Amino acid sequence: MWQGLHKEFQAHDVDVIVIGIDVVPEQCHQYMDKATELIDAGVSLIDSTHTTVAALNFRNVPMALWVNADGTIALPAHSSPVTPGWGDRPVPEGLPPRMAGRIEQLKAGVDRHQEYLTALRKWVQTSETPPPLDTGLTEDQAMSAAAFELGDHFRVAGKTDQQVACWRAAHELDPNNWSAKRQAWTLVTTADGAAPDLIQEDTGPYDGNWLDDLVAVGGIKNYYPPTPW
Amino acid sequence: MITAELVTASDWEAGTGWHLEDKGWCEGDRCIPLNGLTRDDEGRFHAQELARATGRAVYAADGLLAVGPEYGSGTGAVAGSALPNVTLTDRQGNPVTVASLVSRRRRMVIHAWAPW
């Protein structure tokens, strides 16, 4: 979808920059290779240190921010659904029970993708932005980002115990930093050489898992960050 | 990443974007005075104290200290602020800075996704 928007927005001098977030950059490659149009345009990048989580407040995905031509932020980080949600689609048969349970949760969410696309196209065509949100972090959220960064330093250094301690602290300090939680969980639950596990059930040394934590925050309505429209 | 409780001005400048002037630590049009900040004989600052003074979170473990983003209402990547100059990589692993994207003088939609 973003490839199509990139092409559409070119006429308005707007570039789409796509950033894949994963501490294992190779996990992004297969998806990037499918999006060859974006790769060719030089706007498909990888964030292998979660730098954008701390700097741009991308604490979940999909999220986006809009940037003016002078490099100032037009609209801070926000949820950016550009494809339809699960809505009335049936849950596919044969899924592992917890994956099916999570899709049931997703189905209960409000599908905002048309509203988002309308607001995005309006900005592209007229530069008119929705009222901005205050996306300033709390001290705990900022400290969570620091704990994640330190944990990743230990991960690269092979100091697993210290890595886990830091990432557990990151999760506790900011339970809604789903980027930090899902990154940690998937590293535990993904077999070597396999594509990222999307069930993330038995998360080993970390507390919680995707489905139970999603239910714990009150379901899908509290899962994605708020939007300004 | 800071490897000690004490930090040099140049390390703090490199890691946070704040810079040391005669009137204090400054970032953009904001400055905080130096009085009240502890320095050792070599002029180094106490990292935790400097972090609090500049509104940055820190997390310490195993003798290392990571400086987190700025916190508080209206801080960070808010509307009207300059896009932070983070460094990412392309498909081939080459570094790409956000500043190089801004230099195109075109508007941008920056979209984050993840394979997990």
Image: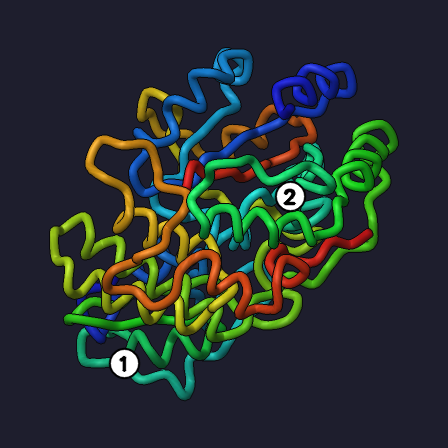
Amino acid carrying label 1: it is Arg
Q: Please tell me which residue is depicted at 38% across the width and 76% down the height of the picture.
A: B50
Q: Please tell me which residue is depicted at 68% across the width and 26% down the height of the picture.
A: B106
Mark 2 vs mark 1: in front: 2
* Residue B46 higher or lower than B56, as above or below: below
- Mark 2 touches mark 1? (CB < 8 Å): no
Q: Answer left or right for B53 relative to B82.
A: left
| Quadrant including the N terminus of chain B | bottom left
User: Dot 1, how many residues are within 10 Å of its Cα: few (below 14), some (14-19), or many (20+)?
Assistant: some
Closer-to-camera residue (B33/A29): A29
Q: Please tell me which residue is depicted at 70% across the width and 25% down the height of the picture.
A: A14
**Residue B25 seen from this side:** no
The residue pinned by badge 1 equals: B39
Amino acid carrying label 2: it is Leu
Image-quadrant location for residue B68: bottom left
Which of the labelled discs sits on residue A161, or is there none?
A: none
Image-quadrant location for residue A112: top right
Q: x, y percentage for residue A86?
A: 66, 40
The residue pinned by badge 2 equals: A65
* Residue A7 higher or lower than B106, as above or below: above
Q: x, y percentage for residue A49?
A: 34, 46
Closer-to-camera residue (A227/A104): A104
Secondary element under disc 2, as helix, strand or loop, is: strand
Q: x, y percentage for residue A229?
A: 82, 51
**Residue A150 seen from this side:** yes
